[in-house]
Structure formats: C-alpha cells, structure tokens
Image (cartoon, rainbow, N blue to C red):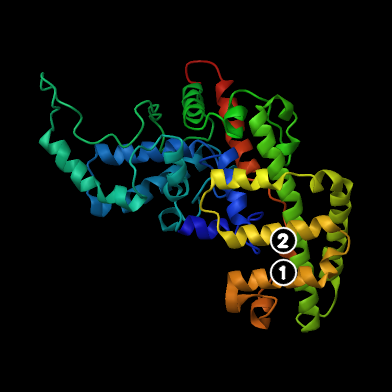
Amino acid sequence: MLEVVNLFREKGTLDELGFGTIRDTFSERFFPGTSTIQTRVRYFLFIPWIYQKLESERVASAHVDQQARRWQAALARALAAGGEGDAAGVIGIQAGERLQRPPSVVYWAGLSRWGIRTFSGSLEQYHLSFDHLNQEARRGLRSDDTEGELVEASRRNWHGGLPPPPPDLFESTSFALSREEAEYLQERILTSAPSTFLAQLVQGRRVTDRVDAPWLYPQLSELPRELRNEVEHARRFSLLAYGAQLTYNVMLAQRAVELGIHTESKFVDEYRQAIATWADEARAELSALRSWDRSAFWALIHQLNPGLRPPTYRFSEAWMTAALEDPSGIADREDVRRLITSRERSLKGGLARLQSQRALERWNPSTGAYRLTYRWDQGRRVAADILAGLARRGADA
C-alpha cells in the first residue's frame, strides 16, 4: 500500500482526473515489473540475495522483517562505500533501518513478474512462512520417488538460476552488473515478458538519454507491428489526456484567483500558454486523430485490463470527443468545464478542489501537468544497466 500511495506522489504520475488505470495498463504492457519508485535494476538481485541469506540462517518469522531491514541498511552503506549515492539511486542511504519503504517493498511485485520470486504471497506472508520453512529444514523432508532421495527442506522461493552474490556484498558494492548477472536478468525478462518494449530494449537495441517517450524511440520502425500499433494508441491517448490535465489546471488557477488564494494571475497565464501550445499540436494532426479507431483502442485496453471501470471509459471518451471537435479554446467551453468538474467531484467528493476552498488552498500550482510516458524512464534505465553489464568482459565481469 505504501508503494501505491507514494507512486501517486511521484512527478509525472499525478492522476487528478482518473487516467491512472489507462496509464498503468500501458505501462505494465510496455515495461512489466517496473514502477516509478524503482531506481536501479541490480535491486532485482540484491533483494533475493538478502532473503536467501536469511533463509539459510533460519531466522524466525518474528525477526525476519527486522533482520531484512538491517541487511538492506547495510547494503545502502556498502553502495555508498562503493561510490554510489542518492543521485545514483541508493534507497535508504539516509534513513537506514528506519526507512518506511525499503527496497524489498519497492521491488516485491516486480520480482514476481520477472519470475525471480516464486513465492506467490505478499511480503508479509513470506516473512510469516519462515517458521514453517525452518521446520521443514529440520525434518529433512524426502521426496516420494522410489529411491527416497533427500530433497531440499525449504520450498524454493526463488528462481533456481539466480546468480550467487559477490563475497563482499555488504562491504562495498555498486549498481554495475557483472556479465553473468546481466545475462540472467536479460533471460528473465525475455522469458517472462517476451513481447514487450522492455524485452526489445534488453536485446541490445540502442538506448539513448535524449529520447523522452517510447514513440520517439529511433528504432521504433524495427519493433514488431503489434507493439508499434500499441505504442501509437498510447501516444494518441497521452496527447489528448495532456489537454485535459492542462484544462483542469487552468480552471484551478482561475478559481484560486477568484477566491483570493492567489492575488496575481501568473499561473493562469502560464497554463493558458501551455494549453494554447497543446492545441496547436493537436490541430496539426487533427485529421489523423479524428480518424483514429478508438473502438480498437478500447478493445486493447479491455484486453490488457478487463477491470477498467465504466466511469473512466465514459469520462475519457467524452473528453476526447470534445477535444477533437476543436482543441482551440477548449478550456473556456462550459460543457468541458462541467465535464471536468463532475469528474473531479466523482473521484474526490468533498475534497474536490474546484468546489472546496480548503482543498484548493492545499493545491500547489507549480506542480504542473505532465504527459503520460508509461514508465519509459524506468524501462530505459533498466535496459541501460543490463546492456552495460552485457558489454563487460573478464572473469569478474
């Protein structure tokens, strides 16, 4: 729950109008197992290594959480000793064992999605399972085959091909993957998510920091047709959804001035300029947007996420229809303003900023509006780390 709550605090993931379900559907389709609060890909190995250590030490269930936090704090210190820091993506370098959201929480779901974690329950359930694991280990359970061969006492909670940890893991380490580690993570992604954008990137395709969204990827034309079509659907939705966010911010900024919360129209002017720029962009491809097969778009969304709620569909459709009538001046249309006001009220109730002065007073107008890029930055970082590891040579690569 902490991961979900904090996800919506991250820059670029604000979901004031309830587009998050569609955003996350595409995000998981393109870059499965990632999240906006993950940092570096080697944590997909750090966490299993820590828990394998705790399993081998037969820690009691009552002490697993504390011990896991202790080793994750030690890992943060080892990363700092190895030259990594906050800017490099070390989690908990300052808070240590007091960290509310340790790496194990941040990466737990992704470890399952990539097939690295084979235990099927929650992190808490895994911790509670340690006493049973320890009992099994003491009993030395045997298999049912005719030879009575002794089997591993503890259930296999982690993928059998996991590379071994380096001997100095908790003394000095870094985010750099060895070649063996990079090959393992590449294999896990290609096996668990073979038809995704992430799988395409980790197969050696060029990754560049100058690309800000998946549809701007230089080698997009080389990707499978189905994936290219999905990226185009995502791009068009991102463009139109951005207009809704800007319109909402124009309305908030105007309301704040009307109520005297802000005494100058600085933010009104800034958001109006932003939406004028957006309208120019939308008009430039208005013909293509109007001929866009939105039924195919929604069929794709429902295929990927059958749990999409009808209100999200209805609001998104109503907004896109209005935007494609004429993007110019859309923020001043009464029907559009009623649509957005109603949507916010249905999502937030008494906390809707357009209707509650107290809620509006807590609005930070500099937060801005951001285009949906569907975890592109996280996927690109994962691929860059893996490709750097694959390029290494030598015994300790």
Give 283 or 393, whichever is nearer the viewer.
Answer: 283
- Look at 59% across and 69% down and name the residue there: 347
Name the spot of residue 375 as percent of width and height, x first: 62, 44
Height in image: 7 above or below 357? above
Name the spot of residue 335 as percent of width and height, x first: 78, 70
Name the spot of residue 386 as percent of width and height, x first: 56, 29
- Look at 72% across and 55% down and name the residue there: 241
Type of the residue with mark 1: Leu
- Look at 10% across and 19% down and name the residue there: 146
Within 10 Å of disc 1 (Cα), the crowding (few <14, some 14-19, many 20+) is some
Height in image: 103 above or below 206? below
Name the spot of residue 323 as percent of width and height, x first: 80, 58
- Outermost residue, bottom side: 259
Instruction: Tell me, yes or no, if residue 14 can be seen here.
Output: no
Which numbered disc, 1 or 2, marks the residue that appears first in the sequence? Answer: 2
- Look at 60% across and 32% down and name the residue there: 383
Q: State the mark number for residue 339.
A: 1
Q: Secondary structure at mark 1?
A: helix
Q: Secondary structure at mark 2?
A: helix
Give 93 or 10, whichever is nearer the viewer.
Answer: 10
Q: Quadrant of residue 314?
A: bottom right
Q: Is residue 43 left or right of residue 297?
A: left
Within 10 Å of disc 2 (Cα), the crowding (few <14, some 14-19, many 20+) is few
Which residue is disc 2 drawn over? Answer: 318
Label pair 1/2, CB-CB below 8 angstroms? yes
